[in-house]
Amino acid sequence: MHVGDAFRRLVPPGSWVLFLFFLAGIWLAISPFAMTTQASGTHWITPTINNVAIGAIMMVVSLLGILGYMLFALRDLIREAQAKQDIERQAIELPANQ
Amino acid sequence: MLTTRLTLGKYTCGMVASLIIFLAGGWLILAPFALGYQPYGADWTTQTVNDFATGIPVAVVALASFALFFISLIGSLRAGGILVSRPRPQAPVEYQPHVTTPLASVTSQSDLDKTLATLAAALAADLTARRQAGGDQQSDQQVEQMMNRREA
């Protein structure tokens, strides 16, 4: 298997969408300060707290989704490689046993 | 013996993450009214516009992401032979003199045979290439014997 194929199996199109959510979460968290709706040096107002909380949730959930998919896909790749090695070993050992 | 395990955890990860983010997008749309920082009847504040402009695309794209992971899950289940696509409805035939085997089982068996044949051919080509590189001339017969045994 080529590196490109393995990469496509580790990072499917859905993971790219999750990465977009990660960027959206960053924007949500910094938007009250970027749009100056939150005055600096004062207590956070309700919209600021809401946006920062939702942005943090989106960042964490999207990252966990990407990493979780990647770990499971990596485990599948390792299992497939082991199964292929087993077949090759059996093909080599079979004539020797005859 | 070769065993193939079908893992669904990766798809579940993606679908759960997409669902949570969809709910977050929905909350972003509702939050200005639920938390009371957007008064009713007044012009929308900057925070409300920002929450709407972010929440609606997030919710829509989260649904698309959920669909992508779900389609991948269905494809994986079909590749594993768990799901079999339904046979297309055909025009009713007035008279069928012969009793035929069910179309679904024939289709799935044919797909399985094709998949196994492709896998066997790829393995045989790989082994042949490796052994030819090493100068071993007996590999073809061994692989053929292996393939014959597997087919039997």
Image: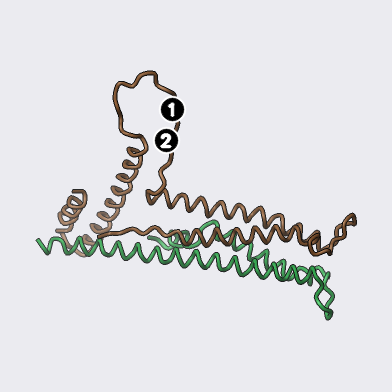
Near mark 2 (Cα within 10 A), the count class, few <14, some 14-19 or many ≥20, is few
Residues indicated by labels 2 and 1 sit on the same polypeptide chain: yes
Above or below, B55 relative to A63: above
What kind of element bears circle 2? loop
Q: Position of residue A64 (x, y in %)?
A: 56, 68
Residue beneath label 1, please?
B90
- Letter of the chain that mark 1 sits on in the rendering: B
Q: Quadrant of residue A49?
A: bottom right
Chain the render paints green = A
Please give left or right for residue A8 compared with residue B142 in the image: right
Q: Position of residue A88 (x, y in %)?
A: 24, 62
- Residue B99 is marked as none
Q: Residue at x 72, y 58 (%)?
A: B55
Near mark 1 (Cα within 10 A), the count class, few <14, some 14-19 or many ≥20, is few
Task: Report the residue that reaches farthest toward the left.
Answer: A98
Name the amino acid, label 2. Pro
**Nearer to us in this view, B101 or B128:** B101
